[in-house]
Amino acid sequence: MRILESQTVGKHGDLSLNEDGLFVGDAYVAVIDGVTSKAKYNLRRPSPGVLTKETLLTAPTFDSSPRYDHLSPLLTMPQCLEQTNSR
């Protein structure tokens, strides 16, 4: 897969506060669209959305698990989910 351009732009101008991410694998791409807390005050740094994004992007099963090795890049999302969950 060849990616020509990619960019995520957060609401705050500080990359460390950006709750969105992008994973590019050999056969697929995943867009991580973080959720912004609706609380008036955020007592946590980083926010729950940033923690979730970082957890997903650094999970060892996300890009290196044999669980995904058998998947064809030509599968539709329902087919991919069915094959992944059947193992």
Image: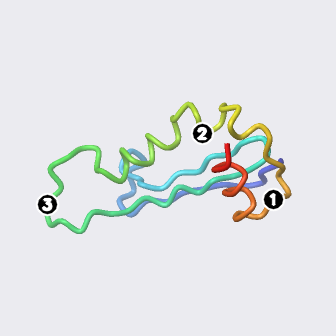
Check disc 1: other Cα within 10 Å, few if <14, some if 14-19, many if 20+.
Answer: few
Q: Label 2 is placed on what type of residue?
A: Phe
Q: Label 1 is placed on what type of residue?
A: Leu
Image height of 11 relative to 49, above or below: below
Q: Residue at x 36, y 53 (%)?
A: 49
Write down the quadrant of residue 42 in the picture: bottom left
Task: Name the N-terminal-most of marks 1 and 3.
Answer: 3
Q: Which secondary structure lies at badge 1?
A: loop
Check disc 2: other Cα within 10 Å, few if <14, some if 14-19, many if 20+.
Answer: some
Check disc 3: other Cα within 10 Å, few if <14, some if 14-19, many if 20+.
Answer: few
Residue at mark 1 to residue at mark 3: CA–CA distance: 42 Å
**Front position among marks 2 and 1:** 1
Most extreme residue toward the front is: 86
Residue 17, horizontal then vertical, whole percent? 36, 50
Residue hosting label 1: 75
Please state, as top left, top right, bottom left or bottom right, where the C terminus lies in the image.
top right
Label 2 near label 3: C-beta < 8 Å?
A: no
**Front position among marks 1 and 3:** 1
**Front position among marks 3 and 2:** 2
Task: Name the N-terminal-most of marks 2 and 1.
Answer: 2
